Every structure is written in C-alpha cells, then in structure tokens.
C-alpha cells in the first residue's frame, strides 16, 4: 500500500499537506510513499523505507543517510525539461543542445553551463532538513 503525501486530494485517498506528515508515523502503515512537489513543474518522488536504525545520541535528527541523483532545478519546466538540461550538462554535444533549444532559448542554456545534475551535497541536505 502507498499513501500520497501531496498537498492535494481527489477526495478518495489519504492525501494531505506534506508539512503535516511525519514520516515516522506514516511508515507505521506503509514502506513506500509518494510525494508531489511544485505543482507547476509537477515533481513526483517516491520515498521508500529501507531500514530503521536504532536511536543514537551521536546524530542530530532528522538526517538523510543517502540519496540518488542531484538537486532538482526550480521552475525549469518539470522532469522532461530537467532531463534535457541534465543530458546536455553531462554531454554538451550538438544533438543535446539542439534538443534543449527546442524548448528553451540560449540564455537559459547559459545559466546551466556549470550545473552538475549528479552532484549531491549530503551536508547541505542535512542542514536544510535539520532546520526547526
């Protein structure tokens, strides 16, 4: 079973505002949740419980132990546009640039010149989620 933690509801599921969802409570009922962020770009994520670690005073909670992929780009046009940008950043071939130019202009491409779609800063993630 999965629960949707997105801030919209069709009236037939358990959807609610993500800021009101405690993962520790949700994972009592399910091992996988879906989360939708930024309804303009419609970013969809799956959060899967893989392991529960015993509590330790050595850690500041909450914290992220692992992630896959780099950060998303705000207001870039959603997953389709992001994937085109990421492909071009990984391989600045003429073909990748041409595919990107079909949906954005040259100025947009220039702003992503140094973007690394695979970079993950675990310290930055933990700084953000650790804010109270």
Image (tube, rainbow, N blue to C red):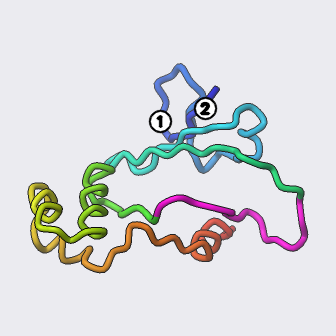
Position of 100 with respect to 85 (left or right) is left
Q: Reply above or below: 44 against 77.
A: above
Residue 105 in percent (x, y) is at 10, 66
**Alpha carbon distance from label 1 to label 2:** 12 Å
Magenta includes 50? no
Q: Residue furthest bottom?
A: 114
Q: Secondary structure at mark 2?
A: strand
How far across and down, in percent of the image, does residue 110 sit?
18, 77
The residue stretch that appears in magenta: 55-69
Going 28% across and 60% down the picture, which residue do you hit? 76
The image quadrant where one finds the N terminus is top right
Measured as percent of width and height from the top left, residue 22 is found at: 71, 47
Residue 8 badge = 1
Residue at 53% of width from left, 19% of height from top?
A: 12
Q: Secondary structure at mark 1?
A: loop
95 or 55, nearer to the observer: 95
- Foreground of the two, 87 or 130: 87
Q: Is residue 20 left or right of residue 44?
A: right
Q: Local crowd at mark 1 within 10 Å, few (<14), some, or many (≥20)?
A: some
Question: What residue would you read off at disc 2?
Answer: 3
The residue nearer to you, when weighing 91 against 70, is 91
């Amino acid at each position: 079973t999965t629960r949707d933690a997105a801030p919209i509801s069709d009236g037939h599921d358990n959807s609610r505002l993500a800021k009101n969802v405690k993962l520790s409570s949700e994972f009592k009922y399910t091992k996988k949740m879906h989360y939708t962020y930024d309804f303009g770009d419609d970013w969809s994520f799956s959060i899967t419980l893989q392991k529960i670690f015993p509590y330790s005073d050595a850690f500041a909670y909450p914290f992220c132990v692992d992630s896959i992929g780099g950060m998303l780009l705000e207001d870039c046009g959603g997953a389709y546009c992001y994937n085109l940008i990421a492909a071009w950043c990984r391989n600045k071939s003429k073909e990748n640039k041409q595919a990107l130019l079909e949906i954005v202009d040259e100025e947009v491409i220039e702003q992503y010149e140094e973007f690394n779609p695979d970079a993950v800063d675990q310290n930055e993630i933990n700084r953000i989620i650790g804010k109270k």
